[in-house]
Image (cartoon, grey):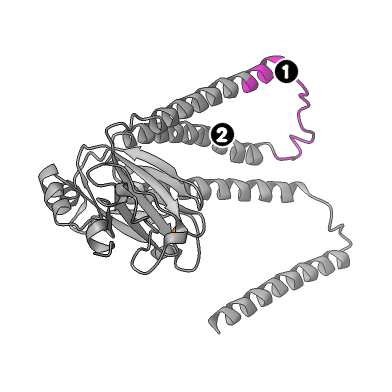
């Protein structure tokens, strides 16, 4: 009901504006003025409006920086995350610098050089080789540098040595996550969606010897400073595994395995001391995958190796939970 009322008010507002314009046109006709003629006074008014809009716009940008920067993610809690943070900061500093140089000029020129009696015709300046070279070559060099920096960062992150990483499967479906540790052999047992049945929600092949020691959980625990390799699967649609604090994100695609390796560098306890007691590392879905997409999350806990080992020892293997005795 409220929405309908808001829509009605907006329609009436537009209708009123149209009528006001129409009245002013009729008045000009009565005064025998050409409504389409742009006078010096109109230009001066438009110039001033543009300047005010420019000041308000730049002011609002500064306001957003001041108020929203404190809401941003804390520094990365993973090794490769520091590389992503540096890349992000480098790009942002560059963009913000260019923004604050070009935009004040844009609004100021609109105000300063509008047509008036002193300035009846625009200055005709068709070509300048030197300027053309500068504004072609400088952006080319800068953008090439940014792209090379980004490619080398992505390359170093995705080509990490995973030989001693602990393997964990992240299994996505509408609308939750399940994780499966590869167990002592560090090899995930074979799985297939056709084997999904009853409590075996990941379709693990219970006859495969590699699957016997796998551990299925709904909360992931990691040991700090130990590399992990996440292998992602999806049962239904494309999901995206997003661990914002670790700067990890990778699509989970039905029918194929995707992966992301990382090393957590801070424990949950350290983060709680730094960010407040409510802090938790969390896995989110970053693809709009359906009605309950927003609620698709799983807790990640980073702890010391002793704490992690104790937790792992308390978990049941697939053999113990799913295999019929
Ligand atoms: Cu999803």
Say whether mark 1 is within 8 Å of ligand 1. Answer: no
Residue at 62% of width from left, 47% of height from top?
A: 50
Residue 13 position (above or below residue 99): below
For residue 236, side relative to residue 212 (left or right): right
On the image, the x and y values in percent for residue 12 come to: 67, 77
Dot 2 crowding, Cα within 10 Å, few <14, some 14–19, many 20+: few
On the image, the x and y values in percent for residue 241 come to: 41, 51
Q: According to the image, label 1 marks what residue?
A: 128
On the image, the x and y values in percent for residue 56 come to: 51, 50
Report whether residue 141 is seen.
yes
On the image, the x and y values in percent for residue 124 come to: 78, 26
The CA distance from mark 1 to mark 2 is 20 Å
Residue at 76% of width from left, 28% of height from top?
A: 123
Cβ–Cβ under 8 Å for marks 1 and 2: no
The label shown at residue 102 is: 2
Q: Main secondary structure of the magenta part?
A: loop
Residue 106 occupies quadrant: top right
Report whether residue 72 is seen.
no
What span is colored magenta in the figure? 114-136
Dot 1 crowding, Cα within 10 Å, few <14, some 14–19, many 20+: few
Q: Residue furthest toward the front?
A: 325
Residue at 22% of width from left, 44% of height from top?
A: 184
The label shown at residue 194 is: none
- Judged from the image, the secondary structure of the residue bearing numbered disc 1 is loop
Tell which circle, 1 or 2, labels the residue nearer the N-terminal end.
Answer: 2
């Amino acid at each position: 009901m409220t929405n309908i009322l808001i829509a009605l008010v907006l329609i009436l507002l537009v209708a009123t504006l149209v009528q006001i314009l129409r009245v002013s046109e009729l008045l000009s006709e009565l005064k025998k003025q050409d409504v389409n003629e742009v006078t010096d006074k109109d230009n001066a008014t438009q110039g001033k409006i543009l300047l005010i809009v420019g000041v308000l716009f730049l002011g609002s940008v500064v306001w957003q920086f001041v108020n929203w920067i404190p809401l941003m993610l804390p520094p990365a809690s993973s090794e490769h995350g520091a590389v992503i943070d540096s890349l992000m900061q480098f790009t942002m500093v560059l963009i913000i610098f260019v923004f604050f140089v070009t935009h004040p000029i844009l609004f100021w020129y609109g105000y300063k050089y509008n047509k008036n009696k002193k300035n009846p015709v625009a200055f005709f300046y068709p070509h300048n080789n030197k300027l053309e070279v500068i504004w072609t070559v400088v952006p080319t060099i800068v953008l090439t540098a940014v792209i090379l920096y980004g490619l080398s960062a992505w390359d170093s992150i995705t080509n990490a040595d995973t030989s001693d990483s602990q393997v964990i499967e992240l299994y996505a479906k509408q609308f939750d996550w399940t994780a499966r540790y590869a167990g002592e052999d560090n090899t995930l047992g074979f799985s297939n969606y056709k084997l999904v049945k009853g409590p075996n929600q990941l379709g693990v092949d219970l006859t495969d010897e590699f699957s016997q020691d796998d551990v299925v959980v709904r909360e992931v625990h990691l040991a700090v400073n130990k590399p992990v390799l996440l292998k992602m699967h999806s049962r239904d649609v494309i999901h995206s595994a997003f661990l914002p604090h670790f700067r990890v994100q990778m699509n989970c695609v039905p029918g194929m395995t995707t992966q992301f390796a990382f090393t957590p560098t801070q424990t949950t306890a350290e983060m709680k001391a730094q960010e407040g007691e409510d802090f938790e590392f969390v896995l989110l879905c970053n693809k709009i995958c359906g009605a309950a997409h927003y609620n698709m999350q799983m807790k990640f806990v980073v702890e010391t190796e002793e704490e992690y080992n104790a937790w792992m020892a308390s978990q049941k293997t697939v053999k113990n939970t799913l295999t019929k005795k």
